[in-house]
Image (cartoon, grey):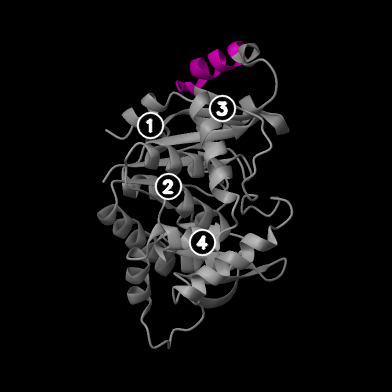
Amino acid sequence: MPCIMVQGTMSGAGKSTLVTALCRILSDRGYDVAPFKSQNMSGYVSGGISRAQAVQAAAARLPLSFHMNPVLLVPRSDHTSEVFERGVSQGVMDTQTYYRYAAGRGIGAALESLESLRRMHDVVVLEGAGSPAEINVPFDMANMRMAEAASAPVIIVSDIERGGCFAQMAGTISLLEPRHQKMVRGFIINKFRGDPSILGPGTARILETTGKPVLGVIPYTRTRLPPEDSLDGGDADANLEDAVGQAAAHWGLVPGRPDSDTPLEDAVRQTARTAAATLNSFLHPGLEEAIDHTAGIVESALDIGAILDLLI
């Protein structure tokens, strides 16, 4: 099944929000769409489910599945994280231990989950992590490896509110391997305040320098969606946090229990049979409105037809 991938010039650029919006836009247009993020790091987690993927599942009108985020890291100290693989704790790991895990078992689990979603749905919208140009990282399982596995065209989003947007876009492309540069179809500028016409000289220079167009400019708005999972995402939404945990418990998706009477795959299959309304009943009442509001802003800012063409 066709896929598309959203990556970012850095953490907090707007990847999670854009994937949420695209899931709702595609769902509204009749596609059976699913979100996927191979690896996430989140302090906002309950029941082994990342909050961002729970919201994206709601946007896609799907029940939760661990396949949507097969590898989840929950920080336990400045130097260690607890690693969950499809909801089951693999223990607390330091950086080097995790890199060894990611290059072996982790990437295997991610590829299996991606393939499962591709079999079950019309479209999969992939989300990267951090930046695809983290040249100091020995094994990045979250960005271009996933794009290659899915044969997914890549859109890179950049946050102009923080400054340095054009340098980030040009720098990101320049640091990618040539084969990965070819997979990038364009950029999206996020969180712009003011008259977008003043960006013309900058977007023209980006096209000249990188060969990649700016596909759209999303205006700054105080989205009512919960913060992204990056650790600079702001205050946690306790109500949603509790809701995700309740949903996970309701569906039998309880992490850290490899000896459970119900195998994980049975639990995953069970979620696929659960009505989307069940998920929404556990999420706060304003979430549907917030998703629609965000999707409307993104749809008005982007050429959705051009993005749909990438899926062909």
> Residue 281 bears which disc, if any?
4
Amino acid at circle 4? Ser
Q: Label 4 near label 2: C-beta < 8 Å?
A: no
- Of badges 1 and 4, the one in the foreground is 4
Label 3 residue SS: helix
Which region shows up in magenta?
200-214
Looking at the rendering, in which quadrant would you find the C terminus? top left
Q: Quick one: label 3 or label 1, which is nearer the N terminus?
A: 3
Label 2 residue SS: strand
Q: Nearer the viewer, residue 5 or 304?
A: 304
- Of badges 3 and 2, the one in the foreground is 2
Q: Please say whether residue 208 is one of the residues in the magenta stretch.
A: yes
The quadrant holding residue 203 is: top right
Counting from the top left corner in percent of width and height, residue 200 is at 59, 12
- Of badges 3 and 4, the one in the foreground is 4
**Is 222 situated above or below 195?**
below
Q: Quick one: label 1 or label 4, which is nearer the N terminus?
A: 1
Q: Quick one: label 3 or label 2, which is nearer the N terminus?
A: 2
> Residue 61 bears which disc, if any?
none
Check disc 3 and report the residue beneath it: 170
Q: Is residue 195 left or right of residue 33?
A: right
